Image: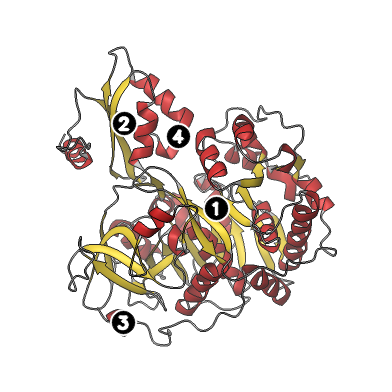
Amino acid sequence: MSSIWKKSYPKGIPHEIAKLEYPTVGEMFRSSCRKYADRTAYLNAGHRLSYRDLELRALGFAHFLTESLKLKKGDAFAIQMPNLLQYPIVFFGAVLAGLRIVNMNPLYTAREMKHQLVDADVRAIVILENFADKLEEILPDTHIDPHRVVLTRVGDMMGGFLKRTLVNCVVKRVKKMVPNYSLPSHVPFRKALAEGNPHDYVLPTMVQDSDVVLLQYTGGTTGSAKGAALSHRNLLSNIAQIAAWIDCLEEANETVVTALPMYHIFALSCNVLYPLTIGASNVLITNPRDMKSFISDLQRYPFSFITGVNTLFNGLLNQPAFADIDFSKIKLAVGGGMTLQKSVVESWGKWVKTPLIEGYGLSETSPVLTINPADGTHKVGSIGLPVPSTEIRILGSDDKELPLGEIGELCARGPQVMSGYWNRPEETKRSFVEGFLKTGDLARMDEDGFLYLVERKKEMIIVSGFNVYPNEVEGVLTSHPQVLEAGVVGVPADKTGEQVIAFVVKREDSLTEEELRSHAKKDLAAYKCPAQYRFVEDLPKSPVGKILRRVLRETWLAK
């Protein structure tokens, strides 16, 4: 295809990124904090954190990690919390300590937590107190010593002031306001900050740009979550690619809204790391599902940059108070994580002068691979053009490049692409062809170089922007003693983009849907649990015995 997309680049956008300014994320962080020291870095629940304070607290936390917890360069360190002021302090503190960070969804079940903690060989964790009961359940099966568990609370950064509404939203899915756990050796987050001395901390000198700084877990057709190993160079390259593409934002003059969770790679790169380089102020939304509170924050802080998934934008547009938001300063609105529906894009355009544009990426690619131009030349329905220094190929089933316009697997090569999956050399080998990452997504490219996603090759289901893997859900359902077989598919849903549907063959007739729902909730995060169940006599299978999910999906849609 000879990089035909470059002819569609807006004027002034470079075809390639320049040499990286910093070798590590830590050096980039400290440079930005010093440059924008007096600006507000983060806002959350009425509390502000300046760049100067952010650097001092991150350095202090790094000192605590290395001196008090005795963590060494390269040790795996997990973060499990929603969007709170503690997150950037903990994240950048771990970066400065030279650790390998493992992001974890706070809503994971104990089973999901255990897999990730063991697979990554995690040695320490910072977790929101309200979810500590699940950690306690599986802690003996991990490599985490109890004294390396740091518990934080919602109000730890609020000087003792705690909004009850905020507490309610954070623990929305937790039955008790005071979690039932017993971790006597844990360290309170405030104590960790008090013990760390930012003035005594000496940055590790052996951190290389090729070192893995982040293990971002993602799934696969095996149903087993695996860690995409992202280096300092990967993340910094993607930041440079984003910066080269987005020329409408100014230094020390922007406010970004972060409603997507920072443990998600989309928000981490686009809302945390990139805005840091331009000294933007970041409004953290702890619970975007609370639309009333969310819109109140949008009204309080005139913003210039917002990201989200289709369901988030759709939810905002359907709120009467949306009309009262001040959009006079907005310069950029980007959707990703799931396909933007045409109706949502059009509805947004009726209210906001700045168009809602779509991008595309993966955990394996730091994540941005493509994005639409922000100058008005975007194409609705397209995931945009490859960002600078990125090559795209559309390959057929024989791994040969297809002619323009034909549908095949989207494959990508660039400095933002991971080195591989953590401790999975065979799976890594299968995921690349001639240096190009096989994304598993089917796409086509038009004559202008714009890409269009057609279908997900891996049968992955996306619920509100989060990946759900059928094999994992089927494994949990069939672990019930009264289930013989289960087949799981995704079907369109208005509110969440897709919803999970389960076809179940009973082993015993006494099994009820209520019992199966209860069983699933024990081992699956809520967004992974089937929304609907259908009991059937048998499941359609191929000659070799593989469940034909395509047939199941067609059966459901035809009802």
Neighbours of disc 1 within 10 Å: few (<14), some (14-19), many (20+): many
Q: Dot 1 corresponds to which residue?
A: 263
Gap between marks 4 and 2, in whole Å?
A: 15 Å
Pick the residue in front: 509 or 512.
509
Badge 4 or badge 3: first in the primary sequence: 3
Mark 1 belongs to which amino acid? Tyr
Q: Dot 3 corresponds to which residue?
A: 8
Pick the residue in front: 428 or 406.
428
Gap between marks 4 and 3, in whole Å?
A: 43 Å
Pick the residue in front: 323 or 557.
557
Q: Is mark 2 on a helix, strand or loop?
A: strand
Q: Dot 4 corresponds to which residue?
A: 524
Mark 2 belongs to which amino acid? Gln
Badge 3 or badge 2: first in the primary sequence: 3
160 lies above or below 456: above
| Mark 2 vs 1: CB contact within 8 A | no
Q: Residue at x 42, y 70 (%)?
A: 354
Q: Position of residue 523 (x, y in %)?
A: 47, 31
Gap between marks 1 and 3, in whole Å?
A: 33 Å
